[in-house]
């Protein structure tokens, strides 16, 4: 291929054959790349070590707030349940429901039996019984 120049000179490109060129690895360039990667890794690691305690502190604070809200909710629920329990244990209310809804009537005074439990004896005490126990072989 011939190229015509602007001043009447003919330029002919020279063909170059690079098939015999042997490429060699530049050790200095490779070493610089490794230093750059090491520097970047050190920078990322230092930023991570700097940010980690702050993130943990923030996460701990958020957990404490969440627990405080849960505690307040549980205290309020406990208060409501205690009120409900007190209203359900009200004997006047229970008797009124029994008479009104179930049609029950109070028993006659002659049919009422009051049963009291004796207080339990302290541990290690022996109670006397009506039967006398004798050692075996004694008459």
Image (cartoon, rainbow, N blue to C red):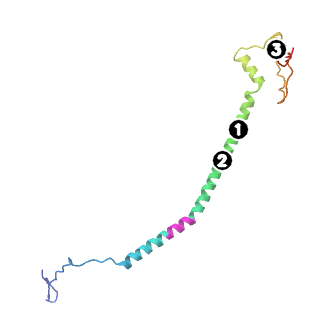
Residue at figure coordinates x 50%, y 67% from the top left: 44
Nearer the N terminus, badge 3 or badge 1?
A: 1
Q: Position of residue 67 (x, y in %)?
A: 65, 48
For mark 1, does the 10 Å Cα neighbourhood hold few (<14), some (14 to 19), or many (20 or more) residues? few
Residue at figure coordinates x 50%, y 70% from the top left: 42
Instruction: Give the magenta range.
Output: 42-50
Q: Is residue 33 magenta?
A: no
Q: Quadrant of the C terminus?
A: top right
Q: Position of residue 112 (x, y in %)?
A: 81, 13
**Number of the front mark, 3 or 2:** 3
The CA span between labels 3 and 1 is 37 Å
Pointer 1 residue: 78
Q: Nearer the viewer, residue 114 or 109?
A: 114
Picture quarter containing residue 119? top right
For mark 2, does the 10 Å Cα neighbourhood hold few (<14), some (14 to 19), or many (20 or more) residues? few
Q: Secondary structure at mark 3?
A: loop
Q: Secondary structure at mark 2?
A: helix
Relative side of 123 to 71, left or right: right
Relative side of 80 to 27, left or right: right
Pointer 2 residue: 69
Relative side of 113 to 26, left or right: right
Pointer 3 residue: 113
Query: Is residue 35 depicted above or below 68 in this figure?
Result: below
Q: Nearer the viewer, residue 111 or 2?
A: 111
Picture quarter containing residue 10? bottom left
Nearer the N terminus, badge 1 or badge 2?
A: 2
């Amino acid at each position: 291929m011939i190229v015509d120049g602007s001043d009447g000179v003919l330029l002919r490109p020279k063909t170059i054959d690079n098939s015999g060129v042997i490429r060699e690895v530049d050790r200095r360039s490779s070493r610089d790349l490794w230093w750059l990667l090491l520097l970047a890794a050190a920078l990322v690691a230092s930023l991570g070590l700097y940010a980690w305690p702050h993130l943990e502190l923030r996460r701990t604070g958020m957990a404490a707030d969440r627990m405080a809200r849960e505690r307040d909710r549980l205290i309020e629920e406990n208060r409501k349940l205690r009120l409900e329990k007190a209203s359900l244990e009200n004997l006047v209310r229970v008797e009124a429901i029994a008479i009104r809804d179930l049609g029950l009537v109070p028993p006659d005074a002659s049919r009422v039996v009051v049963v009291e439990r004796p207080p339990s004896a302290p541990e290690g005490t022996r109670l006397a019984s009506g039967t006398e126990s004798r050692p075996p072989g004694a008459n």
